[in-house]
Image: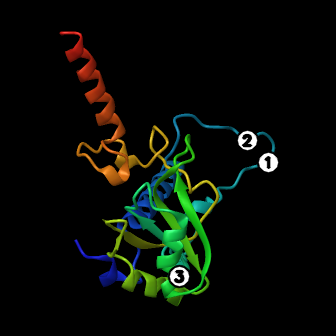
Amino acid sequence: MRSTVERLDRPSTYYASKVTRASLTTVLWVSSLRQPSNFAVKPQGKRRRYQEPEAAKPQEDPYDALREATTLYVGNLSFYTTEEQIHELFAKCGEIKRLVMGLDRFNKTPCGFCFVEYYTHQDALDCMKYIGGTKLDERIIRTDLDPGFQEGRQYGRGKSGGQVRDEYRDEFDPGRGGYGRAYAEQRQKEEEEYGQGR
């Protein structure tokens, strides 16, 4: 696996897989429109002409959004890292326009990621080069270019409100809240059964 610094202007693996899934869905949708249906609709009065669906028209390259991106996704943060600590570290690469902390969807507590928006693309690239892979709160942080923050992305996507990766983690990680939530629930159930003598 190559580090972020080796691929500064290229998309992250997550973004690339997200774009691939979206384009595959579009291709499948267009091909389903072109297949003949089992029943024929008889037009009443006027003849209908086949029109090319909008999805089949040429689209712009999804990676264009990253060519001038000024936003960074920052991952693998401790749940206890503060906004001030992040601002202090990331301001060393350029003036920060906006900083958005990732929150648990239900508890509204930090859940280990954030978005840092700079004024220029070059500042974002410098940050990836010099800060990506360094330690903050004894954790190695990960930085990736992001097409831009949109409202709603600051919340975790996991079932319990946090990040998906924290749902099923089976090792103890004190910086990210201990055990993963699914594993912690399983351990608690086993301890209760053990206490009852089962």
Query: Which label sits on residue 43?
Result: 2
Amino acid at dot 2: Pro
Q: Where does residue 139 sit, x and y in percent of width and height?
A: 32, 65
Residue 52 shows in the view: no
Residue 167 to residue 103: above or below: above
The residue mark sitting in front, 2 or 3, is: 3
Name the mark on residue 46.
1
**Kind of element beneath mark 3:** helix
Locate residue 15 relative to residue 180 in the image: left or right. right
- 173 vs 82, left or right, is left
Q: Is residue 8 above or below residue 52?
A: below
Q: Dot 1: within a 10 Å radius of its alpha carbon, few (fewer than 14), some, or many (20 or more) residues? A: few
Q: Tell me the amino acid under the disc marked 1.
A: Lys
Q: Which mark is residue 91?
A: 3
Image-quadrant location for residue 132 = bottom left
For mark 2, give the secondary structure.
loop
Pointers 1 and 3 in contact (CB under 8 A)?
Answer: no
The image quadrant where one finds the N terminus is bottom left
> Looking at the image, do the residues carrying marks 2 and 1 touch, with CB atoms under 8 Å apart?
yes
Residue for point 74% across, 49% down: 47
Which of the labelled discs sits on residue 81, or is there none?
Answer: none
> What amino acid type should be assigned to the residue bearing mark 3?
Ala
Would you call the spot at circle 3 few (<14 residues within 10 Å), some (14-19), or many (20 or more)? some
Q: Is residue 41 visible?
A: yes
Report the front residue among 122 and 180.
Answer: 180
In primary-sequence order, the first of circles 2 and 3 is 2
- How far is the residue under mark 2 from the one under mark 3? 64 Å
The residue nearer to you, when weighing 139 against 122, is 139
Which mark sits nearer the N-terminus, 1 or 3?
1
What SS does tag 1 mark?
A: loop
At horizontal 37% and vertical 61% (from top left) the residue drawn is 76
Left-right relation of 33 to 194: right
